[in-house]
Structure formats: structure tokens, C-alpha cells
């Protein structure tokens, strides 16, 4: 967990007038010293923070093209009192130095604050439970490689049971979302989460992680 407390430089009092920039109260960019690992993270809600189940990271072994259009809602929200503390959940794929850029907006001005984090080598990862896939269900593994398989077939009017299994926390798959069906399910690491759907229309039924970075689809015939 990366926890940030935001204070006013002059009064040294907590800031409560943060404005949403590109749809969020903060943005965090983390880059490894060798410039090969990159993550763009957002703050977590209090519910997500307490549950610890929403991994906000997306580490890549390749450079990311940030020149591509951003998909956030580019609206500034200035109403009400903002939180003075924000948190992001991320996972570091290796030990070493990482540069963290925290970005906030206040009074119409975007402020970027840099930090350096020295990630120490940790202990071996704890074992996670094996996937528990019931008979007749289709297993979908969620990992740093995305959804596997990314595409599967279904028949209109027939019930389909999908068994999502998140194998590790080194991905942004903390939840799965079916926008058309208005279904959102949390995906804790090491647990099998079932999603039952009965397609009523033929065509493509898309699903994605909560960050809309990992994507998959059901092809309904």
C-alpha cells in the first residue's frame, strides 16, 4: 500500500479541496530504475482499502505508449470536501529503486510530486489455493498475462458458468466487470469466483478488469 497524506505547504493543515483530474483525485506513475517497468495507479476507495482486494497495478516488461488517448472521464469535480489521504495498491516485480510521481489538482492547477522508493528483496511468496472449478464451468485464469482464455464461445439462451481464478497479485485484475450485464465481481487472489450468465442476444459480450486494462469477450452464437 502506498499511502499519501496531503497537506497545505503554508498552513501545514490537511488539504480538503482536492479536485478530480481526469476523473480521479490523484494519479500515480511508478517507473523502475532500468525504465523497463511501468505502472499507472489510482486511489482506492475506503472499502477497497479495508478489503485489500483491489490490485491497482499493471506492471509491464515493455515500454508503455502514454501518447495514446487517455480513457478517463476528463471532468473536474470541485463540489464537496475531498479526502486529505489517498492510497494506492501496487505490486513491485523486483527489488531496486523506483521513481514515484504523485499527481494532484488543486485550485485548477495540477501539482506533481516525485518520490524515490527503495524496494527491498522480500521473502518467498505465500502459497495460494488451487483453483476450485465445479463441473460444467469454464475456467478463466487472471494473471499478469491478462485473462486466459481471452475469448470463449457461448450459445444464446443457454446458461454459462465462468470460474475466474486470480493466480497472483501482480496484475490489475482485482475485479471483473460485465458492463452490458451490470455485473461486477471481486477477484481475491487464490480464490475461484463464479459468474453465471445466460446470454439473451447473439454477438460479442465483453468483460474487463475494474481498470479496463485486462479485457476478454464471450462470443454468443
Image (spheres, helix red, strand yellow):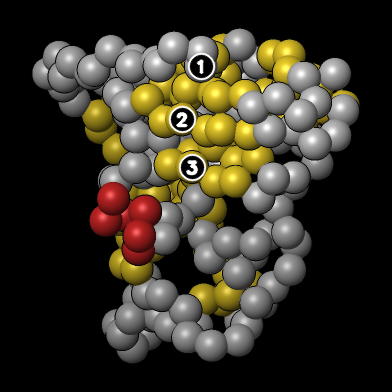
Residue 198, quarter of picture: top right
116 or 214, nearer to the observer: 214
Q: Residue furthest left?
A: 123
Expressed as whole percent of the image width and height from the top left, the position of residue 20 reads 60, 69
Q: In the image, what residue occupies the spot 80% across and 41% down?
A: 69
The answer to whether residue 64 shows anywhere in this view is no
Name the residue nearer the viewer: 140 or 194.
194
Visible in this render: residue 5?
Answer: yes
Which label lies toward us, 3 or 2?
2
Assess whether mark 1 and mark 2 are in contact (beta carbons under 8 angstroms). Answer: yes
Residue located at (43% from left, 42% from top): 186
**Figure quadrant of the C terminus:** top right
Residue 206: x and y, percent? Answer: 73, 32
Q: Is residue 26 above or below residue 196?
A: below
Nearer to us in this view, 86 or 49:
49
Instruction: Look at the numbered disc 1 and give the secondary structure of its residue.
Output: loop
Q: Which mark is residue 194?
A: 2
Q: CA distance from mark 3 to mark 2?
A: 9 Å
What is the number of the mark on residue 185? Answer: 3
Q: Identify the mark nearer the N-term, 3 or 1.
A: 1
Local secondary structure at mark 2: strand
Q: 10 Å neighbourhood of mark 2: few (<14), some, or many (≥20)?
A: many
For disc 1, the marked residue is: 137
Residue 191 lies in quadrant = top left
> Residue 63, relative to residue 10: is it above or below?
above
How crowded pointer 3 is (Cα within 10 Å; few <14, some 14-19, many 20+) is rated as some
Closer-to-camera residue (136/101): 136
Amino acid at each position: 500500500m502506498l499511502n499519501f497524506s496531503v497537506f497545505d505547504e503554508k498552513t501545514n493543515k490537511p488539504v480538503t479541496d482536492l479536485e478530480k483530474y481526469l476523473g480521479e483525485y490523484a494519479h500515480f506513475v511508478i517507473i523502475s530504475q532500468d525504465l523497463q517497468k511501468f505502472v499507472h495507479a489510482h486511489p482506492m476507495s475506503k472499502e477497497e482499502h479495508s478489503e485489500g482486494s483491489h490490485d491497482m497495478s499493471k506492471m509491464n516488461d515493455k515500454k508503455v505508449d502514454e501518447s495514446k488517448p487517455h480513457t478517463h472521464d476528463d471532468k473536474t469535480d470541485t463540489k464537496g470536501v475531498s479526502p486529505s489521504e489517498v492510497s494506492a495498491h501496487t505490486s513491485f516485480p523486483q527489488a531496486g529503486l523506483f521513481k514515484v510521481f504523485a499527481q494532484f489538482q488543486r485550485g485548477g492547477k495540477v501539482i506533481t510530486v516525485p518520490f524515490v522508493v527503495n524496494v527491498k528483496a522480500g521473502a518467498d511468496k505465500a502459497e495460494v489455493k488451487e483453483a476450485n472449478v465445479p463441473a460444467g464451468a469454464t475456467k478463466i485464469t487472471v494473471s499478469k498475462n491478462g485473462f486466459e482464455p481471452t475469448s470463449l464461445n457461448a450459445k444464446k439462451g443457454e446458461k454459462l458458468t465462468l470460474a475466474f481464478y486470480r493466480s497472483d497479485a501482480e496484475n490489475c485484475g482485482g475485479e471483473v466487470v460485465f458492463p452490458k450485464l451490470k455485473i461486477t465481481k471481486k477477484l481475491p487472489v487464490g480464490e475461484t469466483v463464479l459468474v453465471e450468465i445466460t446470454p439473451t442476444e447473439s454477438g460479442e459480450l465483453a468483460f474487463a478488469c475494474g481498470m479496463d486494462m485486462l479485457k476478454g469477450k464471450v462470443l454468443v452464437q
